[in-house]
Amino acid sequence: MKLEDFEGARDLLKGIVRETRLIRSECFSEYCENDVYMKPENMQVTGSYKIRGAYCKVRALLREKTPRGIITSSAGNHAQGVAYAAQKAGVNATIVMPVTTPLVKVNNTKQYGAEVVLEGDFFDEAYQAALRLAAQKGYEMIHPFNDLDIALGQGTMVFEILRDLPDAEVLIVPIGGGGLAAGVSTLAKILNPEIHIIGVEPSGAASMTLSLKNGRISTVKNVQTIADGVAVATPGDIVFPFIRENVDEVLLVEDEELPTVFLDLVEKHKLIAENAGLLSLAALRKLNFKGRKVVSVISGGNMDVMTMAGMVQYGLVDRRRVFTFSALLPDRPGALAKLTSLVAKHKGNLIRLEHNRFVNVNRNAAVELEITLEAFGREHRDEIMEALKEAGYDAHLSMTKTIT
């Protein structure tokens, strides 16, 4: 992949993609002590960067011949990109998606005119199903990441990044199969050999980390991550050499780290990012340097509302802004009102209350009360719990309870 190749891809994409401008984040800058900018590809056409590579690949195919149809496999974002590109080109598209794909991605793909087939629990299984269909029907297979036309398209975002921030020192990109990381890292190093490239994987799908460690393409045995967009067991062998040469380090993020980042992004920037798109922001806490100009690529924002609700819930619980405690109190008039009045005095906001009168045969001895409260954070929660204990209540936090 050479500079002129990336320039050709950029020219091809004019009028097709949005030039997503960098957003400086005071919030993320403060907590990692760097100057952080976000590349909001969640605001891109089809909701992710994938349209860049998909469109370039479809146009490359059409330069050679008019296919009977095109087919691909995807956890969602590439699917929408291919469907959109095929619709623009007037070509039939079939997309094989894992059965676990969020409904919003399935519906959006259908809205671009593609036929959707759900098969397999994660990407690699859907990919094998797509290969079988391609052979049966004579369709042209478009790989979602292991393709240089795809990588060239993805890399075009670097032109925009360095236009907005010419002195960027660090680029952070999510890694799934490797198409995005290959394209971004290669062009970035061409334009600025000194720039530091960091890839980020979920620890439950760290196939690129394993491959780099082994020095060859390797497969992880078990893919377990909520970041469905990068849930890849085997990275691409075509793009792997570019990553090995141009990505300086790869960081791992636990699934449990993503909900609080989601909450920050929603509350501070009013932006929605899917779990894979949050990886580059979650990685900011793991940086071992300070005071540098850092760009985090938010790769996509296609998240269904049920997943959003869960992310908000777990984010609030993790921040101790929602918590549940249980307490025993006598079953007599006014006992409940006395306890809830004490909570109100300390500005705890009641979300849910469960009053179990059958926890003890002797109801006069005790009934169980379980309360879920909204608080300002950990210190406020601790203040409420201490007040309860000082008032004589045997109150205990429930660390496993969440909102329902």
Image (cartoon, rainbow, N blue to C red):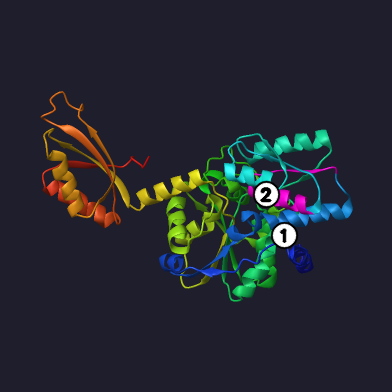
Position of residue 121 relative to residue 286, above or below, is: above
Task: Report which residue position mark 2 lands on.
Answer: 80
Position of residue 294 relative to residue 242, above or below, is: below
Does the stretch in magenta take in 175? no
- Check disc 1 and report its element: helix, strand or loop: helix
Return the mark for residue 108.
Answer: none
Three-letter residue code for mark 2: Gln
- For image coordinates 12% across by 49% down, the residue present is 390
Q: Nearer the viewer, residue 393 or 232?
A: 393
| Badge count | 2
User: Is residue 311 something that shows in the picture?
Assistant: yes
Does the stretch in magenta take in 84? yes
- Check disc 2 and report its element: helix, strand or loop: helix
Return the mark for residue 153.
Answer: 1
The region drawn magenta spans 68-88
Position of residue 311 relative to residue 379, above or below, is: above
Q: N-terminal of the two: label 1 or label 2?
A: 2
- For image coordinates 71% across by 35% down, the residue present is 129
- For image coordinates 72% across by 59% down, the residue present is 153
Question: Is residue 63 left or right of 195 when viewed as pictured?
Answer: right
Q: Residues within 10 Å of mark 2 (few under 14, many from 20)?
A: many
Q: Position of residue 208 (x, y in %)?
A: 61, 50
Q: CA distance from mark 1 to mark 2?
A: 15 Å
Q: Position of residue 31 (x, y in %)?
A: 41, 65
Q: Position of residue 245 (x, y in %)?
A: 67, 60
Of circles 1 and 2, which is in front? 2
